[in-house]
Image (tube, rainbow, N blue to C red):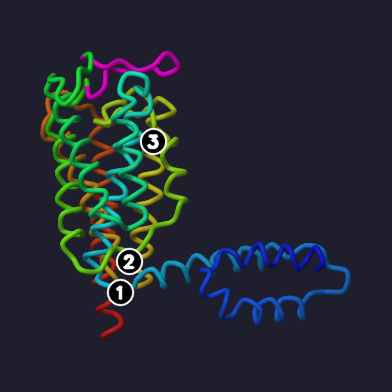
Amino acid sequence: MTSLERRYRWLLRAYPCGYRADYGDELLDVLMDNAKPGQALPPLREAVALVVGGLRTRIITAAQGPAWVDGLHLAVVALTLVNLAVLIPYATSVPLWLGLSAVSLLLVLRGLPRLALPFAGLVAFKITGITMGQPWLDATLLPVFPDGLWRGPALYGNGGPVAPLTANLLIVLGLVLLATRGERPKSRSWWWLAAVPLVAGADPAGLDIVAGSPMAMTRVFLEVALLSVAAYAGHLTADPRWAIAAGAYLLPASAVLAENHQLLQRQDLAHWGLLIVLTALAAAVPFRARRRILL
């Protein structure tokens, strides 16, 4: 195998496994036939086209099955991931609940809502207790301060209890709905776990935007990137599943706004407004694309 073929095979990994199994060899043959003698690197334009084509194919193949089920499962994945990331800076104070939150996320990613439900329910009950200043379920010393390497407020010390309660209620209700179906949701990519360290350390209430900390900016960048992908996916497939997930993610952020409206500054309102615009765009483009197809 030549170095050029290895590089082409690496680029073709952008396509889903099933697509590569059906068409990968054919694509590779075409690419190698068009290569110049002695060529060692794919042309930049061709490499970009392969990656973009692979991602488009992944999005199209992901739009399978009931949209509301897949959208709800995506929402539960995102909210459970945020729950886990929030607890990481407080690991030595709440190791049990960090572990249960991690187990819950792994089970949700594997499409096992019935197994994830009791873990998520326990974590939700404990988080609700912490936000209300009550050491429910175990003798947690309150308030819970971050570990030495982390800086920030006490766990759920900002923003009040409404937003965490909203997020965890959505997780539990979403898992209940998914668990009552006869067919389990599809498994999600392990790449979702890469977002955990990116979100860890940011204020769960999202009230650290004004300070402009790197953790807060990273979270905002990740939110904008994922919501933009949701809008593009809805445009490409005319499917609302990504809009459903985006709308569910917006609800806790809106709860923060309602609960802390007297404390919000322009940066907080701008952040919330950006989430609103991107979520509305993700909700609108599938119907516009569907209408264009019908016409």
The C terminus, quarter of image? bottom left
Left-right relation of 193 to 152? right
Rate crowding at label 3 as few (under 14), some (14 to 19) or many (20 or more) other CA atoms within 10 Å. many
The magenta span reads 142-156
Q: Position of residue 183 (x, y in %)?
A: 25, 69
Q: Residue at x 25, y 54 (%)?
A: 113
Query: Which residue is labeled 2 in the image?
Result: 234
212 lies left or right of 163: right
Q: Which mark is residue 289?
A: 1
Tell me residue 144's x, y (percent): 26, 17
Q: Position of residue 39 (x, y in %)?
A: 83, 67
Residue at the image position 28 percent from the left and 66 percent from the top: 285
Tell me the kind of residue under disc 1: Ala
Find residue 286 and report its horizontal and vertical position in percent. 28, 69
Q: Which SS class for mark 1?
A: helix
Pointers 1 and 2 in contact (C-beta within 8 Å): yes
Q: Nearer the viewer, mark 3 or mark 1?
A: 3
Vertical comparison of 11 with 198: above or below: below
| Residue beneath the point at 82% across and 63% down | 40
Give the structural element (helix, strand or loop) at label 2: helix
Q: Name the mark on residue 199.
A: 3
Q: Amino acid at mark 2?
A: Gly
